[in-house]
Amino acid sequence: MRITAVIPVCNESETIRPLYAELREVAEANDYRLRCIFVDDGSTDGSWQVVSELAATDDRVLGIRFRRNFGKAAALSAGFDAADDPLVVTLDADLQDDPHELPMMLARLREGYDVVSGWKQVRNDPLSKVLPSRLFNWLVSWLTGVRLHDHNCGFKVYKREVLDELRLYGELHRFVPVLAAARGFRIAEVPVNHRAREHGQSKYGASRIVKGFLDLVTVKFLTGYGQRPLHPFGALGLGASLIGSLGMIWLAMRWVISRVVDGMEPIHLHETASLFYCLALLFIGAQLLTVGLL
């Protein structure tokens, strides 16, 4: 079985060698032809030197180095471009993902699935990281309809054809199962062992919550309205235009009645705030319809 492991690296010099040793052990025990691609995403701690030494002594290792930190999605995308095996596995370089779970994930893949995602059922992380992650996972499942317990898990196995159809940028690496499901690929999830962090520091921060939400909105539009953008914008535009038009009709009727009925003080529309609200709704409705068409 030919497999490529794509591993983003950012200041993980202490864990690269142990991780590769575990991966090689799993590959030899299960007769896999394993190739490892380490993508150095702007490390400053000597990680690239470790990767270079491994690549120089083992032709199963390939190193890719970024000039600066471009983010995990860019690192994975570069690794996917360099991988040419029919199966690709991704995992983090911090040793929290257990490579010995790989045979179980591949067995599930052989059941007819295209993507198998790990589920850190028992998670060895602080609550400050676990609770926002659980909320995020619930929100993603609810909005997209792809029911996974752990969209954030970096331990995943893919068939090559899935990656050929996806383009990652921003923080979209967390939504690969969602993007794949939108293209008709079958998604599965299996519980995996999650180990406590012993080296390095977590890359998780409060800014990821904001970025994750914005990327979730992007994914929702890409998967739900990517081929019909006029539907969401057009619906909002028609709604705004309808309310504005009804308001203008109501104001016109009031203006006419105020001049027909004896003793009624005439209404001056330019002094009525409702006129400007209705005009604004008409303009906004037209703009939303135009945006949808564009």
Image (cartoon, rainbow, N blue to C red):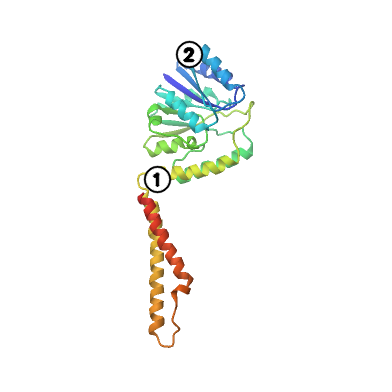
| Element under disc 1 | helix
Please tell me which residue is depicted at 45% across the width and 77% down the height of the picture. Answer: 268
Q: CA distance from mark 2 to mark 1?
A: 43 Å
Among the 4 quarters of the image, the one containing residue 168: top left
Among the 4 quarters of the image, the one containing residue 263: bottom left
| Element under disc 2 | loop
Q: Amino acid at mark 1?
A: Gly
Residue 270 or residue 59, whichever sits in front:
270
Q: List the single residue furthest toward the top.
A: 57
Q: List the single residue furthest toward the front.
A: 270
Above or below for 155 versus 30? below
Q: Which mark is residue 112?
A: none
Identify the mark nearer the N-term, 2 or 1: 2
Q: Which mark is residue 224?
A: 1
Q: Amino acid at mark 2?
A: Asp
Q: Can residue 113 be seen by looking at this rendering?
A: no
Above or below for 258 versus 110? below
Q: Can residue 125 be seen by looking at this rendering?
A: yes
Q: Which mark is residue 59?
A: 2
